[in-house]
Image (cartoon, rainbow, N blue to C red):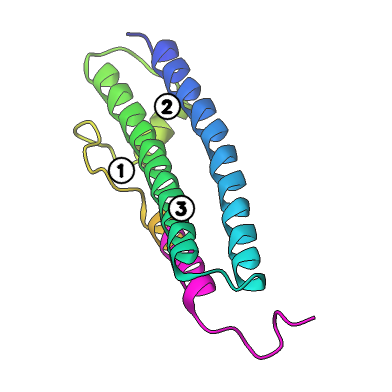
Amino acid sequence: MTEFEILQIAHNSFQQNSAYLLVVTILLCLNFYLIRRARELNMPVYGKALTTVFGLMTVNFGWTLGTFLRGTQVDMAFRLTELKSKGISISASSENWIAFMDNPTGPYTGNTPDLPTMMFWGVIALMLILGMWAPAPKGAYSK
């Protein structure tokens, strides 16, 4: 596989990831809307539970999306490292990418995203759960 092919496959994966990120963003907006409506209508417990499960499924989707992004980044650097070790010259930007990704020695198998992504989705999960189940301030939903 050539350097161009490795970069092309990785960039196709990045484009797919961005399309899925748009879907996750829309789902997240829908989750916050559902939480607001559940509070306004004083939804019964089973409705709140379903909304919470839907929110946690969205968080799982975002977490998985972060994992795929991290996997693509590390795998691209690993494939470029393999190419370089075979004695094929690669571009300076590919060299920089390998250095930026800490010169991986194998394909990505961690099944976890990077730390900022984990923190982001942890905070979102807390916001969704507390937004649904924590008591609201007095007068927050009265008209």
Helix, strand or loop for disc 1: loop
Count of numbered marks:
3
How far across and down, in percent of the image, does residue 73 sit? 38, 34
- As shown in the figure, which amino acid type bears the numbered disc 1? Asp
- As shown in the figure, which amino acid type bears the numbered disc 3? Phe
Is 41 magenta? The answer is: no
Q: Choose mark 3 or mark 2, whichever is in front.
A: 3
Label 1 and label 2: CA atoms lie apart by 13 Å
- As shown in the figure, which amino acid type bears the numbered disc 2? Ser
Image: 45 above or below 88: below
Towards the viewer: 96 or 74: 74
Q: Quadrant of residue 10?
A: top left
Q: Quadrant of the C terminus?
A: bottom right
Towards the viewer: 116 or 139: 139
Helix, strand or loop for disc 3: helix
Question: What residue is at 22 percent from the left and 14 percent from the top?
Answer: 86
Image: 11 above or below 73: above
The boundaries of the magenta stretch are 121-143
Question: What residue is at 43 percent from the left and 63 percent from the top?
Answer: 49
Label 3 and label 2: CA atoms lie apart by 40 Å
| Label 3 sits on residue | 54
Give the mark nearer the N terminus: 1 vs 2.
2
Q: Quadrant of the N terminus?
A: top left
| Label 2 sits on residue | 94
Disc on res. 102? 1
Is 134 magenta? The answer is: yes
Question: What residue is at 59 percent from the left and 39 percent from the top?
Answer: 22
